[in-house]
Image (cartoon, rainbow, N blue to C red):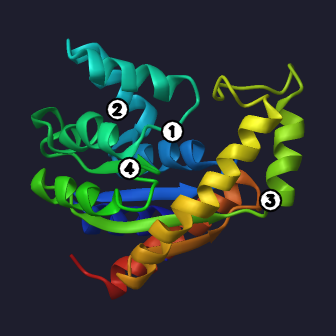
Amino acid sequence: MNKEAKIAGAKEWLGTGSINIFGLAFSGKDTVGKQLAELLGAEFLSSGDVVRAARENTSDSEIRLAALTSDSGVWTPTEEFKQLIVPYLYDEKLDGRALILSMVGRWIGEEEPVMAALEKGGHSTKAVVLLNVSEDEIWRRWELARDPDARNDGRADDSDEEKLRGRLDEYHDKTLPVIEIYRSLGLLVEIDGEQSRDAVMAEVIDKLYEFAGTNPA
């Protein structure tokens, strides 16, 4: 079956549901997410996107402070996360849209309210894509990203070695348990994230199409 047919099949299976993409820093979550959203006619959302939207749309000083904390490179604590992000997942502006999420609900304990909010908004979690990239490769990509000529639209703290180490530690301590929950629910789709960008996307489409065949809507 050709690529276009697989994309059409995955799009039909997804409907107005959601796919959440997980991976280490520099694993390519946003790149894959934006491409996948375009292919499937979906809305792409990262946690940062939602935090910024919440900051702009509220006068609540505590929520605005949490949003600013997130922008500074510190992951939003769970209670603020619930205030900032969870309600946005069933906002009427997203009605009728499929969603591609970039690691929304990355700390243990956040996966349940995320899935509940998505279900409430008509965007049930259809799959969780995990981009598998070794830490050695992450550091290689980080070194490349420090080259001013190679930088793209990364986070403000991407050049800070200690902050990256902190993000990797947080991932192991608080995100890997979330991934294991999704695995136990039969939602995990694992991808070799160390391939070329084109090869990664081809594998994402192939595996989502296969997953849809064994997990019909």
Q: Nearer the viewer, mark 2 or mark 4?
A: 2
Identified by mark 2, the residue type is Val
Q: Dot 3 lies on which element?
A: helix
Report which quarter residue 66 is drawn in.
top left
- Nearest to N terminus: mark 2 or mark 3: 2
Cβ atoms under marks 4 and 1 closer than 8 Å? no
Give how far apart the Cα atoms at labels 4 and 3 are.
25 Å
Nearer to me, 94 or 208: 94
Whether residue 27 is visible to the viewer of this picture, yes or no, is no
Disc 2 versus disc 3: distance between alpha carbons? 28 Å
Question: Label 1's element?
Answer: loop
Q: Image height check: is 173 above or below 90? A: below
Q: Mark 3 belongs to which amino acid?
A: Glu
Residue 185 vs 103, above or below: the answer is below
Q: Are marks 2 and 1 in contact (CB under 8 Å)?
A: no
Q: Which residue is tagged 4?
A: 100
- Report the disc number at residue 75: 1
Q: Residue at x 43, y 39 (%)?
A: 46
Alpha carbon separation for disc pair 2 and 4:
13 Å
Residue 29 coordinates in the image, percent (x, y): 57, 49
First in sequence: mark 2 or mark 4?
A: 2
Q: Which mark is residue 135?
A: 3
Is 109 placed left or right of 142 in the picture?
left
Residue nearer the viewer, 77 or 140: 77
* For residue 14, above or below residue 30: below
Q: Is disc 4 placed on a helix, strand or loop? A: strand
Residues under labels 4 and 1: Cα distance? 20 Å
At 21% from the left and 17% from the top, the residue drawn is 60
Q: Residue at x 53, y 60 (%)?
A: 174
